[in-house]
C-alpha cells in the first residue's frame, strides 16, 4: 500500500491544514494552495497545531513527509500525484477550481473533492476527464476523525476508487465506500440527528444544555462504541418495531432550516468563529472549549483503537 509521494491540497481554511498534516505524517510531501495569503498564513499555524495533536495520538510517523504553502497554484500542482480540493461549498466555484486544476496536472493524477455532499457526478461535469474525479469526504477535525467517505460518481473509473481506498488505508484511516447520494451517508445521518435536536430545543421540550448532556452521554458515547446497525441487535429488532411504529411519525420532518438558526446567523452569531452561537463565549472560552474537544477526541480515539472496527 503506497501513498502518493507528492499531494496537493487546494483551499486551506477549516479543513485543509488538518488534511495536509495527516498526509505529511504518513510520509507524503504536501503542497497547500489558497487564493488568500491571509488564509495561508493562518494555515501554517493550524497545520503545525494539527501535527502536534497527531504527536499526542502517537503511532508511526513516516520519514519524508512535509507541508509547504504557496499562493501560486501552478507551483502547488507541479509534479503532484494526487489533488484534494477543499474550497468553499459552492458548486460554481468548485467547478471552476476543478477545471483550473485539470489544466495544470498530468493525465493520470487523481482529483478528489472534500465536498460535504454535492453530487460528484454534477461536479465532475466541469472536467474533460471525469474518470479521474472522486469524492473524498473527511470529517472535521480531519486529523482526528479516522474515517473517510469514498464516493465515486457515475463517470469515476473503478481503478480510481480502488486507488483512493488504498491511499486512505495507507495513512491508517477507515475508508467507507458509498454509492452517490446527496449529503452522502455521514451528513445524512448527522443532519437527521441535528434536525431533531434543534427542533426539540426550539420547541422548548428541553434546554440546549440538557440536550447536549443527553446526546453526549446517552447516544454519542454508546454510538462511538456500537454502530447503529449493531445497536439494533443489542436492543432487539422487536423493540425497534414497537417504538418506531408510534415514534417515527412524530419526528421532525421540516425541510427548511429552523428559525433559531437563521435568526442567530442574522444576528452575526455563527458559533466559535464569531465568538457566540448556540452558546455565549467570554474572552478565552472558545480556545478553552476547542482544547477540551481536542483532548477528548484524542483520548476517545486512543480508547476506541483498542476495540473492534465495527
Ligand atoms: N468545515 C467542515 O466541518 C467541513 C467542511 N467540508 C467541506 O470541505 C470544503 C472546505 O470547507 P472549509 O475548509 O470548512 O471551508 P473554509 O471556508 O474554511 O476554507 C476554504 C478555503 O478555500 C479558499 N479558497 C476560496 N476560493 C479559492 C480558490 N479559487 N482557490 C483556492 N482556494 C480558495 C478560501 O480562501 C479558504 O481559505 C467544503 O466543500 C466543505 O463543505 C467537509 C467536511 C467538514
Ligand atoms: C455540522 C456539520 N456539517 C457538515 C459537516 C461535514 O462533514 O461537512 C460536519 C463535520 O463535522 O464534518 C459538521 O459537523
Image (tube, rainbow, N blue to C red):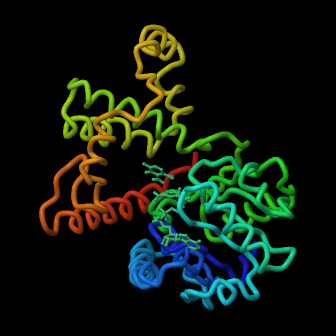
Looking at the image, residue 33 lies above or below residue 290: below
Q: Quadrant of residue 29?
A: bottom right
Looking at the image, residue 194 lies above or below residue 279: above
Residue 198: x and y in percent read 33, 34
Residue 46: x and y in percent read 40, 78
Residue in view at x 40 percent, y 74 percent: 53
Residue in view at x 20 percent, y 26 percent: 204
**Which residue is at the front of the view, 206 or 26?**
206
Residue in view at x 77 percent, y 80 percent: 104
Residue in view at x 67 percent, y 65 percent: 168
Looking at the image, residue 134 lies above or below residue 119: below
- Residue occupying the far left of the picture: 282
Exactly how many numbered labels are in the figure?
0
Query: Would you say 32 lies left or right of 111 here?
Result: left
Query: Would you say 73 lies left or right of 201 here?
Result: right
Which quarter shows the N terminus?
A: bottom right
Residue 163: x and y in percent read 79, 65
Which quarter shows the C terminus?
A: top right
**Which residue is at the front of the view, 14 or 175?**
14
Q: Quadrant of residue 41?
A: bottom left
Q: Quadrant of residue 135?
A: bottom right
Residue 115: x and y in percent read 60, 56
Amino acid at each position: 500500500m503506497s501513498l502518493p509521494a507528492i499531494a496537493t491540497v487546494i483551499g486551506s481554511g477549516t479543513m485543509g491544514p488538518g488534511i495536509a498534516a495527516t498526509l505529511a505524517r504518513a510520509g507524503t510531501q504536501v503542497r497547500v494552495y489558497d487564493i488568500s495569503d491571509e488564509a495561508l498564513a493562518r494555515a501554517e499555524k493550524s497545520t503545525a497545531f494539527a501535527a502536534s495533536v497527531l504527536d499526542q495520538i502517537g503511532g508511526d510517523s513516516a520519514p519524508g513527509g512535509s507541508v509547504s504553502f504557496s499562493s501560486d497554484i501552478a507551483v502547488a500542482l507541479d509534479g503532484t500525484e494526487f489533488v484534494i480540493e477543499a474550497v468553499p461549498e459552492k458548486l460554481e466555484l468548485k467547478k471552476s477550481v476543478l477545471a483550473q486544476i485539470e489544466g495544470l496536472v498530468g493525465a493520470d493524477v487523481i482529483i478528489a473533492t472534500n465536498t460535504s455532499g454535492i453530487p460528484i457526478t454534477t461536479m465532475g461535469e466541469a472536467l474533460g476527464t471525469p474518470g479521474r474525479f472522486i469524492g473524498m469526504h473527511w470529517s472535521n477535525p480531519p486529523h482526528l476523525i479516522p474515517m473517510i467517505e469514498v464516493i465515486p460518481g457515475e463517470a469515476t473509473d473503478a481503478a480510481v476508487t480502488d486507488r483512493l481506498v488504498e491511499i486512505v488505508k495507507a495513512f491508517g484511516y477507515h475508508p467507507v465506500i458509498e454509492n452517490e447520494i446527496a449529503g452522502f451517508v455521514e451528513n445524512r445521518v448527522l443532519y437527521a440527528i441535528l434536525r431533531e435536536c434543534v427542533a426539540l430545543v426550539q420547541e422548548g421540550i428541553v434546554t440546549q444544555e440538557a440536550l447536549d448532556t443527553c446526546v453526549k452521554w446517552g447516544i454519542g458515547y454508546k454510538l462511538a462504541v456500537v454502530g447503529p446497525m449493531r445497536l439494533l441487535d443489542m436492543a432487539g429488532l422487536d423493540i425497534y418495531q414497537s417504538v418506531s411504529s408510534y415514534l417515527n411519525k412524530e419526528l421532525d420532518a421540516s425541510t427548511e432550516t429552523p428559525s433559531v438558526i437563521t435568526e442567530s446567523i442574522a444576528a452575526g452569531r455563527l458559533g466559535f468563529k464569531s465568538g457566540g452561537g448556540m452558546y455565549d463565549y467570554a474572552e478565552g472560552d472558545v480556545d478553552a472549549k476547542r482544547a477540551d474537544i481536542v483532548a477528548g477526541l484524542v483520548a476517545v480515539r486512543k480508547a476506541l483503537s483498542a476495540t473492534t472496527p465495527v
